[in-house]
């Protein structure tokens, strides 16, 4: 079942929160109170008790602005500066971006924001030739090859693709360093890489891992499972290595 993931990072007045919403489910956000419960609490005095609502549908999500004064911005961090403005009292504005950053006005030095990962966007099989919608073949694992999460996936698979033999899966700091030279990843952080890994495993590739065991082991197991599935089904192939920055030349004696 397609669903959206809402992530409120730590530092927005509350602890980090991650919500998962299936089609038809809603989550309200705002400062909240005993009489006005919200699923996503934003601890800032400039935010209304009930500021807005996120509504998940089958193939996208909608944003409602319950405020009377300020618009909310929905940015596309994967694009070239695209954004939508949701005006006050606007209900059910459809959001087309696969990954979005919702920014609320505040007096803070850093923006008050949270991320929304949209329901899985469906792409036609690239080999499909015309035909009606009912006769077309959809890809089993829908990927946007221009998105940062796909760059993270390619970086994770790179050692195996270059060596053509089993290799250690890169760690999160290694992925950050490998992508640093890419224009879209100059400000990529370890936490962002971890979020992209979770999105790939949970939503794109739908990998289920046992909850038992230390957190570090589960994280390593998730990276290995993602790489294994991506390589097994040809989701990442040798030609995708061209998406990465040129590898650094090996130094003397390496």
Image (cartoon, helix red, strand yellow):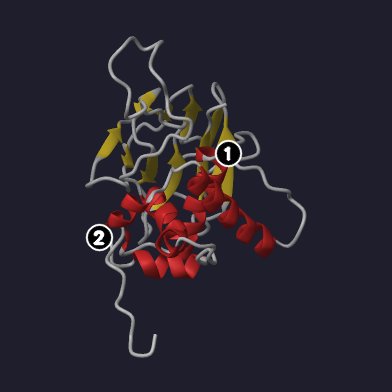
Residue 130, image quadrant: top left
Which numbered disc flags the more N-terminal residue, 1 or 2? 2
Which residue does the image show at 36% across and 12% down from the upper left? 133
Q: Which label is found at residue 190? A: none
Residue 234 rendering spot, x and y as whole percentages:
44, 43
Residue that numbered label 1 is attached to: 206
- Residue 89 seen in render: no
Residue placed most toward the observer, 241 or 10: 241
Instruction: Kindly state the secondary structure of the residue where label 2 is placed.
Output: helix
Is 245 on the left or on the right of 122, as rendered? left
Callout 1 touching callout 2 (CB < 8 Å) = no
Q: Please name whichever residue, 103 or 200, is drawn nearer the observer in this view of the structure.
A: 200
Q: Which residue is mark 2?
A: 183
Q: Residues within 10 Å of mark 1 (few under 14, many from 20)?
A: few
* Left or right: residue 58 compared with residue 83: right
Q: Position of residue 71 (x, y in %)?
A: 31, 36
Q: CA distance from mark 1 to mark 2?
A: 29 Å
Considering only vertical position in the picture, is 150 above or below 159?
A: above
The residue at 29%/78% (across/down) is: 249
The secondary element bearing badge 1 is classed as loop
Q: Is residue 50 visible?
A: yes
Which of the two residues, 180 or 249, is positioned nearer the viewer here? 249
């Amino acid at each position: 079942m397609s669903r959206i993931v809402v992530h409120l990072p730590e530092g927005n007045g509350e602890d980090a929160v991650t919500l998962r919403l299936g089609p038809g489910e809603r989550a309200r956000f705002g400062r909240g109170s005993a009489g006005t419960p919200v699923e996503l609490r934003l601890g800032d005095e400039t935010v209304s008790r009930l500021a807005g609502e996120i509504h998940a549908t089958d193939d996208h999500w909608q944003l409602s602005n319950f405020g009377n004064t300020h618009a909310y911005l929905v940015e596309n961090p994967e694009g070239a500066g695209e954004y939508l403005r949701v005006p006050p009292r606007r209900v059910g504005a459809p959001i087309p971006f696969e990954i979005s950053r919702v920014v609320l006005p505040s007096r803070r030095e850093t923006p008050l924001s949270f991320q929304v990962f949209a329901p899985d966007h469906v792409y036609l099989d690239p080999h499909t030739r015309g035909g009606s919608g009912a006769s077309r073949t959809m890809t089993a694992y829908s990927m946007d090859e221009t998105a940062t999460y796909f760059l993270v996936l390619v970086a994770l698979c790179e050692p195996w693709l270059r060596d053509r033999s089993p290799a250690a899966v890169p760690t999160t700091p290694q992925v950050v360093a490998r992508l640093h030279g890419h224009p879209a990843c100059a400000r990529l952080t370890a936490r962002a890489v971890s979020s992209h890994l979770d999105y790939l495993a949970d939503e794109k590739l739908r990998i289920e891992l046992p909850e038992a065991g230390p957190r570090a082991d589960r994280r390593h197991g998730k990276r290995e499972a993602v790489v294994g599935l991506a390589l097994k089904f040809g989701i990442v192939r040798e030609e995708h290595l061209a998406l990465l920055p040129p590898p650094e030349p090996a130094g003397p004696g390496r």
